[in-house]
Amino acid sequence: MFNILTIFIIIPLLMMLGLWLSRNVRQVRGVMVAGSSLLLAMSIFLVFDYIGLRKAGETAQMLYTSSISWYEPLDICLSFGVDGISVAMLLLSSIIVFTGTFASWRLQPMTKEYFLWYTLLSSGVYGFFISTDLFTMFMFYEVALIPMYLLIGVWGSGKKEYSAMKLTLMLMGGSALILIGILGAYYGAGATTMNVVELAELEIPVKMQNIFFPLLFVGFGILGALFPFHTWSPDGHASAPTAVSMLHAGVLMKLGGYGCFRIAMYLMPEGLQMWDEVFLVLTTISVVYGAFSAVVQTDLKYINAYSSVSHCGLVLFALLMMTRTSCTGGILQMLSHGLMTALFFALIGMIYGRTHTRDIRQMSGLMKVMPCLAVCYVIAGLANLGLPGFSGFIAEMTIFVGSFENVDVFHRVCTVIATCSIVITAVYILRTVGKFLYGEVNNPEYLKLTDATWDEKTAVFILIACVAALGLAPFWMSDLISHSVTPLLSNIIIR
Amino acid sequence: MESLTQFIQMRQEVALIAAFLLMFVTDLFIPERHKKMLHPIACALLFVQTIIAIKPYEASLFGGMYNSTEITSIIKAVLSFGTLVIFLQSTKWLDRPDASHKTGEFYILALSTLIGMYFMISSGHFLLFFLGLELATVPMACLVAFDKYKGHSAEAGAKFILYSLFSSGIFLYGISLLYGATGSLYFDDIAGKLHGCELQTLSMVFVFSGMAFKLSLVPFHLWTADTYQGAPTAVSGMLSVISKGAAAFALMTVLFKVFAHMSDLWIQMLSIVIVITITIGNLFAMRQNNMKRFMAFSSISQAGYIMLALLGNTQQGTASLIYYIVVYIAANLAVFGVINSIEQQTHGMVNRTDYRGLYKTNPKLTMIMTLALFSLAGIPPFAGFFSKFMVFSAAFSGGHYLVVFLALINTVISLYYYLLVVKAMFIDENEAPIPYFKSCRSMRLSLVICLAGVVALGLTSGVYQLLFNLS
C-alpha cells in the first residue's frame, strides 16, 4: 500500500543518493534545487488536498493514514498520518529547506558532504512530522539531531567544536528522557500499541503519568529551548553555518513544541495536571528571560538566538495555557517564528559573509552599502516585534487573547508577565537595527561591499513573502490548525 | 553405536572440531612457500562449518549434559560468523615477517577457543560448562600473547591468564558449593532444589562473579584495558565480541535456567552491577587516547548494556540479548577492523590523535568508522539504536525504571566519547594526516560485511523477529 506521505521520506533519500553520485558543485546544486522544490510543491499540494478532504467532510483525526507492522513483538509499526498541525509543519519545513538551499548556495568547502548531512537532517524532520508511531517518531527525531554535530563542527564558525558538542549532548540528553517517557507510555498503557492516537484512548495509570510526563515534557522541552535547558541554543545557533541555523531554529526547535503537545500532553493529561503550573512558570521565565538576554547581546546571531528562546518559550507557554485559542496561537507561533527566525539567520549569514563580523558595535550605516539586505533586515525585525500585517502579530495576539481566557489569577499573572516580552522585543530589535543599519559608515572598507546576489534574494524574498502572507491572510492557516487542535485538546482537558 | 549417533547429533561441534583438525593437519604439512594459502583455507573451513550447521536444531544428549536448542544453534552460528570476520581482518597482520611462521597457530587457537565456547553455551551440566570455559580461555591467553616479542603483548597475556585463573577458581568454588547445597551439577536438578538459603546465595554470587570476569563487568574489569591494549588488534576484537558474546549468553542460561527461583536476588545484584559497569566504563573511556584502550572501556560499558536484557522476562530478554550481541559484533568489529588496518599500514599508530584529519585522506575508512561508532552510541537509523531500544525495553518491562533511566543518561556520556573520535577524524586539523592507502582485499570484505550489518540489521526487523519467535 503506497502512502502519499512516504514521498516526504523518499525524496530526501533520493536526494542523498543523487548527492552521493554527483561529481561537481553544479550537479550538487541541481539535485538540491530539484529535490527541495519538489518537496515544496508536494507540501503545498498536501495543504490544498488536506483542506479539500476536510471540506468534503472527512472527520477522522488523522488523514492519509497507513500502517505496516515493523517490530511486531513490541507493536512497532511504520504508521503515518497527518492532521492540520503536521500539514502546517510540513509546509514550514519545506519552505525552510528550500530557502536554506539558496542561502548556502556558495558554501565552501566540501559542498557535497554538507548537503548530504543537511538532507539527512531534513529527512529526519519530515519523518517526525508524518509519523504517528511513537517509536518511529523517536527514531526520526534522533536522525534529525545527529547531523547537527558535523554540520556545526565542520562548517561552523567561532567556537564551533564546543558549541557542536554542547548542542548534541544536551539534545541527546533530552532524547534519553523522551525514550524513557515513551517506554513509560507504552508499558503503562498495557504494551499493546505504539500508535499515538490509539494510545491516547487507553488509560495510563496516574502514578506512571506523574513520573513520566515531566520526563517527556522536559525531553522535548530541551529542544524547544525551555528554561533552564536552553543554553545549547545561543551557542549552537551562533556557531552553525547559515542554512543550518535556519533549519535548526526554524524547524528543529518546533519539533520540541510539537512533541510536547502531541506526545507529552496528549498522552498524559493527568500528569500534565499535576505538573502544568511548574512548567508554566518555567516557560514564562523563558519568554521574559530570553528577551532580556537578547537586549544585552552584541553578536547578531546571539541576539537572534535569545530571541528564539523567548519566542519558542511562547510556543510552550501557549500550549500549556490549554485553551483552543491559545493552542492555535501556539502552533501559529511555531510557523511564524520558524519563518521569521529563518529569515533573520539567512540575513545575518549574508551580512556576516560580507563584513566578517557580527558584532553590532563594529558595524554602522550598512543601509547605505547594502540597501536590499538592510531593508529586508528591518522588515524581519518589524515582523519579529509583532507589527500588524506580519505573522508575528497574528500569532502573539492569538496566544495572549487565548491565554487570558483562563480566569484564574495564576494564569492571568503569567500572561501579563509574558506579555511584557513584546515591549522588550521592541527594545532589542529597534536598538540593533538603529545601531548597525543606520548612521554613518564607520569603516571605509564597507563601501566596497556589494548587495545581495540573486540566490540570496531568492531565499530572502520567499521568506518575506511567507511571513507577510501568514500575517495578511491568517485564517487559512488558523482554520487548518484549530480544527486539529480541538480533538487533541478534548483529550488533554479533563477538569 | 548409540553414542556414535549421539555424537553426530552435535553437528555444529563436530563440524567445528573437524575444521580444527583439518586446519591442524594442513598447518603441519603445508610447504613453507604456500603458507599464504592458510588464510583462504581457514576462512573457507569456518565458512563451511557455519553453513553446515546454519539450520537450527534441537537435541539433548548424554543424559542432559549437552543441550542444543534452536536459540543456542543460532548464537553459535553468530559466533562462528563473527570469528570468520576476524579471520578476514587478520590476514595482513599475520603476513608480517615476524608472525608469518605461526599463521597456522593463530587459526588453530582461535578455532579451539570457539569449540570451548560452543560447549559452554550448550552445556546442561556445570562440569561441561567449566570445561568449555577453560577451553575457551586458555587458547585465548596464547592469542593475547601472540606477538610475544612485543613487551606489552606478553604482559597482556600474563595479566589475562592470571585473572582468568583467578576467576575460574572462584567459579569452580561456586560450583562446589552448589554441589554441596543441592547434590547435583545438572542444571535441571539444581534449579528445582534452590530456595535461596545462605549457602546457595553464596554459591550463586561466586558463579556470577566468575562469569563477570569473562564479561568484564565492574568490579571485575581491571584486566580489560591492559589486555586489549597489549593484545594484537584482531585478538582484542575477538575478546571484545566473541568471548564476551559467548560469556553473556552462557551467563544468561545459568541465571535464567539454574537460578530462576532466586531471580529476586540476582536481579538486585545485577541492577547495581549494570549501573556501575556502564558508568565506570563510560567515565574511563572519556580519558583514553589509545584507541584500543578506548575500545576496551567502551566494551565494558557495552557489556553493561547487554546485561540489561536479563532484567526482562525470559523471552524478550533472550531475544534482546542475542540481538544486541549480533549488532554489537557487527559494529565493534567494524571499529576494530579500521583500527587494525590503520595500525598495520602505519606500523603501530593507534592513538586518537593520529586519526586527525583522516577524512581528508581516507574518506571511506572514516565513514565506516563513523557509522560503526554511531551504531555503538545508539544513533538511528543504525542497528545499535534498535538493539539498545530492545534491551531498554526488556529491562523496562521488568519494571526497572531507575536502572533504565541511569543507563539512558549514560548513553549521552558514551555519545560524547564516540563523538571525540568522530571529531578527530572530521574536524581536527592535522598537517600530516595518515596518507591515503588501500586495505587488503579480505579486510575490505570484512568491513563491507560489518557495514552491511550495521545498516541492515536494524532497518529490517527480520532478525529480531526470528530471535523472538525462537526464544
Image (cartoon, rainbow, N blue to C red):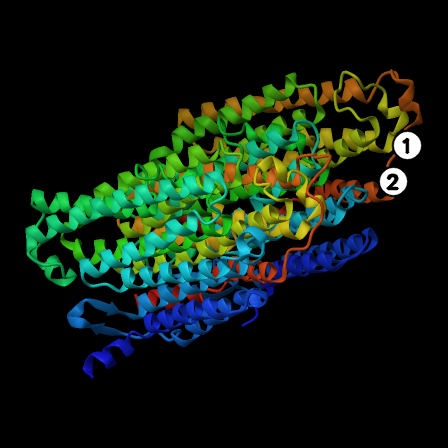
Residue A15 image point, x, y percent: 70, 58
Residue type at mark 1 is Thr
To the question of a shared chain for discs 1 and 2, the answer is: yes
Question: Measured along the vertical axis of the image, is residue A127 above or below residue B152?
Answer: below
Q: Is residue B394 above or below residue A303?
A: below
Q: Residues within 10 Å of mark 1 (few under 14, many from 20)?
A: few
For residue A465, what is the image quadrant? Answer: top right
Q: Is residue B371 visible?
A: no
Residue under the image location 89 percent in, 23 percent down: A446
Looking at this view, is B450 or A249 the one in front? B450
Q: Residue furthest bottom?
A: B1
Chain under label 2? A
Cβ–Cβ under 8 Å for marks 1 and 2: yes
- Residue A118 coordinates in the image, percent (x, y): 67, 47
**Disc 1 secondary structure class:** loop
Which residue does the numbered mark 1 point to in the structure image?
Answer: A450
- The front one of B258 and A6 is B258
Mark 2: few, some, or many residues within 10 Å (few <14, many ≥20)? few
Q: Is B188 on the left-hand or right-hand side of B96?
A: left
- The N terminus of chain A, quarter of image: bottom right
Which residue matches tag 2? A453
Q: Position of residue B374 (x, y in %)?
A: 53, 47
